[in-house]
Amino acid sequence: MRVCLVYDCLFPHTVGGAERWYRNLAERLAADGHEVVYLTLRQWPRGDDPGVAGVRVVAVGPRLGLYTASGRRRVGPPLVFGLGVLAHLARFGRGYDVVHTASFPYFGLLAAGALRRRGCYRLVVDWHELWTRAYWRDYLGRAGGWAGWRVQRACARLPQRAFCFSRLHAARLAREGVRGPVTVLRGEYAGDAQPGAEPYVAQPVVVFAGRHIPEKRVPAIVPALALARERAPELRAEIYGDGPERERVIALVRAHGLGGAIEVPGFVEHSRVDASLQRALCLVLPSRREGYGLVVVEASAAGTPSVVVADPDNAATELIEEGVNGFIAASASAADLAAAILRVRDAGHALRLATAAWYAEHARSLSLADSLERVAAAYGDAA
């Protein structure tokens, strides 16, 4: 089968959950014998191999900065990408059986939808997130938010085979009047889908790993740890990743006098993050908005519980069974986060054993392999 994947980022040149999903999807499809083309923006030096074995990576636009200084997506690069996708599919669309695209940043999807009949391909769309009108207004202001919401709605109403990664966004997509079946995929974890050995005895360290952008609320970890240390002075933190809010995190560490208790090393090798998660007391993910929350699954696979925050846009809460593989804090306030961290500490090794058991029970459905099998089955209709 001839498959065209469409996303403006490519792992590891940019890092995120969607990037990992499309990289894994491309490699799996190629390994299964499919002919795979990956359309993206250039993120590697011209002339270099982008490095996806068995996949033809096509840059349909130049190397562009995707984010503003505040960490929000810029409008220009998605427009350039959409035009590049439109030009490519106008020329080569008839050569594909399936065009599989991310919904966001929308203009690539609009291009694929506009040429669907001409290209005679099946359109498959991943909806990692679907924002409410109120969230759009908060993100881009009244006029920009209205425009973003209208574009999103137009994309939802294209004829398509849709995949979501949470019940939250599947329900929102249905309410928007999606034209086609919707399937929820729970699995994005590419690690060992089988339960491992007994989890490590925890060190008194809480871990965060991800981009330092406003939606992740990484700075909230610092005052929360300071408060938790009033009762448990042995607690420390390791905060991995980078982004526009990293300097604010570092400033808060200094302001709270926690230079000896909190490390903020930036981006590091994935193996180091894995090793930290295996021995961490807990993962702390104070995000306001998550489309899935892969790092929660990665932590659970190591027997490490997680602390996430209740929020209308946070689908990561669907991965937490309260008191079994972690806790859901009522808010990202220092008091609520500190209380959740201390609940993990007080639960001791029994919570780690329960987390490992939770992962063992759900390992198959949480695995990337399970999701890829379901996607490949959906492609079968296009043969």
Image: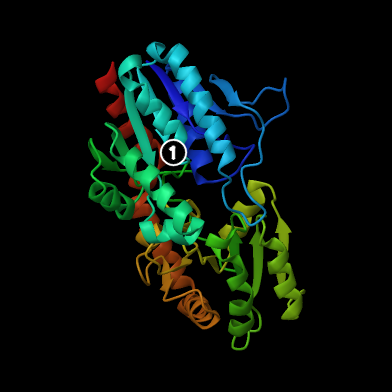
For the rendered model, the colour scheme is rainbow
Q: Residue at x 52, y 83 (%)?
A: 335
In front: 170, or 369?
A: 170
Residue 276 in view, yes or no: yes
For disc 1, the marked residue is: 106
Q: Look at the image and tell me whether residue 204 can be seen.
A: no
- Does 371 sit left or right of 295 as displayed? left
Q: Is residue 11 left or right of residue 361?
A: right
Secondary element at tag 1: loop
Question: In the image as oriented, which residue stretches furthest toward the front?
Answer: 143
> Residue at image x 39%, y 61%?
134
Number of marks: 1
Where, by quadrant of the figure, is residue 56 drawn? top right
**Looking at the picture, how far across and down is residue 330, in whole percent?**
42, 76
Q: Nearer the viewer, residue 18 or 213?
A: 213
Image position, residue 337 (x, y; %): 51, 76
Mark 1 nearby-residue class (10 Å; few <14, some 14–19, many ≥20)? many
Question: Residue 80 at what x, y percent from top left?
Answer: 56, 31
Q: Is residue 33 left or right of residue 228?
A: left
- Image quadrant where one finds the N terminus: top left
Picture layout, residue 182 above or below residue 229: above
Which amino acid, by three-letter code, is at mark 1? Tyr
* Extreme-bottom residue of the structure: 231
Q: Answer above or below: position of 257 versus 247.
A: below
Point out the image quarter for the C terminus.
top left
- At 31% from the left edge and 41% from the top edge, which residue is drawn? 156
Q: Is residue 69 above or below residue 230?
A: above
x%, y% of residue 115?
37, 21
